[in-house]
Image (tube, grey):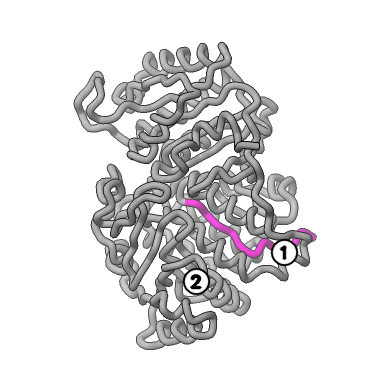
Amino acid sequence: MRPSPAVVYYGDDFTGATDTLGTAARAGLRALLFLKTPDAAHLERAGALDVLGIAGAARAMTPEEMQAELRPVAALFRTLGARVLHYKTCSTFDSAPHIGSIGAAVRVLRSAVQQPWTAIVGGQPNIGRYCLFGNLFAAAGSGGEVFRIDRHPTMSRHPVTPMDEADLRLHLSKQGLADVCSVPFTAASRGSDALDTALRQALHSPPADAVLFDVADASQLAAIGDVLWSRAQGSTLLAVGPSSVVDALASALPALRESRGGAPAARTRVPPAQGPVLVLAGSLSPVTARQVAAASSFDIVWLDAAKLAQRDAAALATHADAITEALARGHNVLACTRTPNAASSSSAPLDAQALARAGGDLLAKVLAATPLKRVGIAGGDTSSHGVQALDAWGLGYVADMGAGASLCRVHSDSAALDGMEIMLKGGQMGTEDVFERLVHGDPA
């Protein structure tokens, strides 16, 4: 009989889901990311897992769409017998009542667990995300200046879900989570016992239906993980937040790792690509723009974002042909959407979701013509739609690409796709040389 996983998580976009996959794998936990709620056959093929992930696109869905998306996840969690159900959000918590509502996700998933309250982990220090006294702060790119999230140069102006409130309690209350109590980082800094005492007070005076855990430093995650895992042993628990949820829980699971032959993994060197590399950059983030500028090993193909967003078949075919021809010549290709002030056939505002879906269509069309060994996708929505357009059912971890980006291996029933390596990264994620590393690998 296959043992139950300790944690089942659902990633609200594909880039974040692969970051959590990498977090679990680097901690020595057996992990696999499914690209939709798995059936019995794919569960059998995956074998025994400590952490089972499901990648989705709830971040771009309405509350009604999220209900249909997440109900099968809740049912699977109950069937598998895991202890923690993790709703993996973006580390910047960008969401809104009408799109990607975290509150809507909690309302669906809470029915799958036994604990009447929801744990919310508010920071991810390894990528520059911090929560202090309930307020979220984020760095602008890897190692960049840290801003309060409502003053962040990118996230405060996000085209779909701009973050205009730094206090996560207020931000989530707009999404229906009215009773969120904050446990300050000062409790976690004093260790597990002090944090457990603070949690008890939060749950009982007056009772809270969600508890937000500050994270000011990575060292505090161990205490959070100890407290959450201890609670989950008695009754199953819903936890919300970025990959730091699994990072915290991993510190509480050494006995599980040892019993199943695992150990914290040494950093795996990224090998050079075998053949030409395609990167689809659908993000307009300044971080991605700097990465594009540093990508000296690529031919750049500028995509007509306006026409693609309008699902112009001729534009799609033209771009696919140009990319395919360059790849066939052995060139690496970086396909980028134009910025809003670039030359375009239309000055109308772009439909970001339509553009992301068109990016998925473009990727599928190119790969059908020219199978590749390695690809990359930049942009959360672009990554989600890009992978969904492929005939694949799962992703396994290969190597760390740094700053919230992981290189993964595709599992597919299609021989042309099975084993292909893919890097997914959010617009704010990755080091400046991440595209170059995708081609050349890490220095020896």
Residue 54: x and y in percent read 56, 50
Question: Horizontal placement of 16 versus 421: left or right?
Answer: left
Quick check: can you spot residue 89?
Answer: yes
**Which label sits on residue 333?**
none
Residue 228: x and y in percent read 54, 74
- How many C-alpha atoms fall within 10 Å of the one at disc 1: few (<14), some, or many (≥20)? some
Residue 174: x and y in percent read 27, 63
Residue 270: x and y in percent read 63, 39
Q: Residue furthest left?
A: 347
Residue at left 37%, top 50%? 144
Callout count: 2
Quadrant location of the C terminus in the rendered image: top right
Q: Which residue is mark 2?
A: 220
Of mark 2 and mark 1, the one earlier in the sequence is: 2
Question: Horizontal placement of 31 versus 178: left or right?
Answer: right
Q: Which residues are magenta?
A: 1-11
Is residue 111 inside the magenta stretch?
Answer: no
Q: Amino acid at mark 1?
A: Arg
Instruction: Label 2, secondary structure: give it.
Output: helix
Position above or below: 283 against 41: above
Instruction: Name the image quarter holding residue 213.
Output: bottom left
**Numbered disc in front, either 2 or 1:** 2
CA gap between label 2 and label 1 equals: 21 Å
Q: Amino acid at mark 2?
A: Gln
Instruction: Label 1, secondary structure: give it.
Output: helix
Question: Horizontal placement of 351 versus 203: left or right?
Answer: left
**Which label sits on residue 257?**
1
Residue at left 55%, top 47%? 18
Position above or below: 219 against 261: below
